[in-house]
Image (spheres, rainbow, N blue to C red):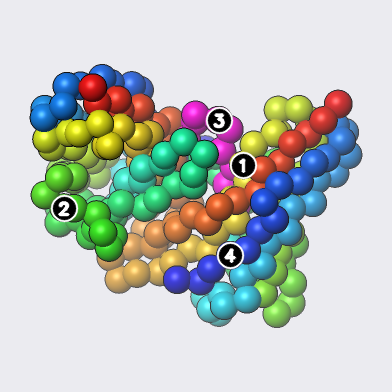
């Protein structure tokens, strides 16, 4: 299947700082990318949908100024957690698809805010 | 969004078929049913999807009822490595793209 890669796999940052997570589609051009977060023993929660070259569409309750999403090219989307706090510590997962075809997921990125 | 209902957990003996049910009674005519699984601390893995007809691939089979209100994922010969959380999802079509909204899923435990 198609490969979606995330970087970094895990990151520790200090409270108040910002951290960026990258999501790349390695062998296809993704028209749409999605960002999820997952807390321990819970399901994945969709945060936002981003289409290349346009602003991301955020799910209800997700702060767009705190979770900045950029989808600058057909193979790269980034999620920046701004002014991170310990409650932002979570497993962040991206996924990508081509025009409504099968959606493939990255390996996920663990964020710990201390 | 079309909602899915799955049992919280299931056990299956190694080597036997694992049948995972899913109800999606509010599904619309053009919405696909997708199945993913997630092994601890990894991203979800695509298994199979379908619209109306039954589907089979190298991993599993998907049986969709004629009224499309429910489906069953079948792992024909479960192994210990199939222990995971299995998610049945109705893909939601939005003007800005299709999206997958995850429910709670079924914890499948394959036991030797």
Q: Is residue B40 magenta?
A: yes
Q: Is residue B96 above or below residue A82?
A: below
Mark 4 falls on what kind of element? loop
Residue found at x 66% / y 67%: B23
The answer to whether residue A56 of the structure is visible from this angle is yes
Mark 3 falls on what kind of element? loop
User: Horizontal and vertical percent for residue A2?
Assistant: 46, 38
Q: Is residue A23 above or below residue A65?
A: above
* Chain-order first, disc 1 or disc 4: 4
User: Horizontal and vertical percent for residue A99?
Assistant: 36, 58
Q: Quadrant of residue A23?
A: top left
Distance, label 1 to label 4, CA atoms, is 15 Å
Distance, label 3 to label 4, CA atoms, is 22 Å
Label 4, on which residue?
B4
- The front one of A99 and B24 is B24
Mark 2 falls on what kind of element? loop
Q: Is residue B13 above or below residue A56?
A: above
CB contact under 8 Å: marks 3 and 4: no
Label 3, on which residue?
B40
Distance, label 1 to label 3, CA atoms, is 8 Å
Mark 1 falls on what kind of element? strand
**Magenta residues?**
B35-43
Q: Is residue B41 magenta?
A: yes
Label 2, on which residue?
A64
Residue found at x 17% / y 22%: A14
The quarter of the rendered structure image containing the C terminus of chain B is top right
* Chain-order first, disc 1 or disc 3: 3
CB contact under 8 Å: marks 3 and 2: no
């Amino acid at each position: 299947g198609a490969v979606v890669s995330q970087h970094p796999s895990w990151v520790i940052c200090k409270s108040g700082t910002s951290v960026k997570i990258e999501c790349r589609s390695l062998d296809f051009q993704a028209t749409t990318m999605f960002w999820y977060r997952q807390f321990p023993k819970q399901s994945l929660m969709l945060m936002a949908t981003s289409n290349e070259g346009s602003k991301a569409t955020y799910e209800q309750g997700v702060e767009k100024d705190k979770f900045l999403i950029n989808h600058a090219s057909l193979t790269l989307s980034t999620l920046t957690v701004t002014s991170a706090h310990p409650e932002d510590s979570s497993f962040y997962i991206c996924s990508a698809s081509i025009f409504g075809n099968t959606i493939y997921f990255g390996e996920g990125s663990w964020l710990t805010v201390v | 969004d079309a909602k899915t209902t799955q049992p919280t957990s299931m056990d299956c003996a190694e080597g036997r078929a694992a049948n995972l049910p899913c109800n999606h009674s509010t599904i619309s005519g053009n919405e696909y049913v997708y199945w993913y699984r997630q092994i601890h601390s990894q991203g979800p893995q695509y298994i199979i999807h379908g619209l109306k007809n039954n589907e089979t691939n190298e991993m599993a089979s998907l049986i969709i009822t004629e009224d499309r209100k429910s489906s069953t994922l079948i792992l024909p010969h479960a192994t210990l490595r199939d222990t995971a959380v299995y998610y049945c999802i109705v893909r939601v079509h939005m003007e800005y793209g299709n999206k997958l909204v995850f429910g709670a899923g079924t914890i499948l435990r394959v036991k030797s």
